[in-house]
Image (cartoon, helix red, strand yellow):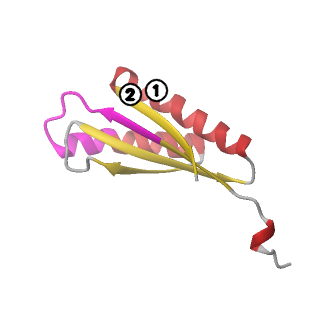
């Protein structure tokens, strides 16, 4: 069965999270924290996640989390779960979380 790509509605949601890695004195420490955060969110929320800013700053980071689905409800639920996981892991180190639709 062939699907016409013009008939499939796809929703893409993007959650951008900026946070601090307090006490980190090296990129190695920051990357360990980042790796744990990314693995936890990826495994629990079925989303894509990547560091997208401040790669060379050892105390600050921005990660972008993307979810793709046929409907906005599924994307919203996945991004809600991802944001809650980030809040649990980061606590007061979370600077901002912003959502947008692509």
Q: Is residue 17 left or right of residue 23?
A: right
**The one of 23 and 94 positioned closer to us in this rendering:** 94
Q: Residue at x 30, y 41 (%)?
A: 61
Image quarter of the N terminus: bottom right
Magenta stretch, residue numbers? 16-33
Classify mark 2: helix, strand or loop: helix
Classify mark 1: helix, strand or loop: helix
Q: Residue at x 26, y 37 (%)?
A: 60
Q: Quadrant of residue 44?
A: top right
Reply above or below: 90 against 40: above
- Residue at the farthest right position: 1
| Residue 90 on image: x %, y % | 38, 27
Q: Residue at x 44, y 47 (%)?
A: 64
- Residue at the farthest bottom position: 2
Mark pair 2, 1: CA separation: 5 Å
Reply above or below: 52 against 5: above
Q: Residues within 10 Å of mark 1 (few under 14, many from 20)?
A: some
| Residue 22 on image: x %, y % | 23, 28
How many numbered marks, from 0 up?
A: 2
Checking the image for residue 90, the label placed there is 2
| Residue 36 on image: x %, y % | 38, 40
- Residue at the farthest top position: 92
Q: Quadrant of residue 18?
A: top left
Is-magenta flag for residue 87?
A: no
- Residue at the farthest left position: 25
Q: Residues within 10 Å of mark 2 (few under 14, many from 20)?
A: some
Checking the image for residue 87, the label placed there is 1
| Residue 53 on image: x %, y % | 31, 49
Checking the image for residue 48, the label placed there is none
Q: Is residue 55 left or right of residue 95?
A: left
Does the residue at mark 2 contact the one at mark 1 (Cβ under 8 Å)?
Answer: yes
């Amino acid at each position: 069965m062939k699907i016409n790509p013009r008939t499939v509605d796809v929703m893409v949601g993007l959650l951008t999270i900026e946070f601090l890695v307090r006490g980190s004195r090296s990129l190695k420490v920051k990357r360990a924290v980042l790796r744990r955060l990314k693995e936890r969110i990826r495994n629990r929320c079925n989303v894509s996640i990547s560091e997208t800013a401040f790669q060379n700053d050892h105390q600050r980071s921005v990660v972008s989390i993307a979810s793709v689905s046929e409907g906005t409800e599924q994307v919203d639920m996945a991004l809600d779960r991802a944001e809650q996981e980030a809040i649990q892991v980061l606590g007061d180190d979370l600077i901002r979380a912003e959502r947008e639709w692509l």
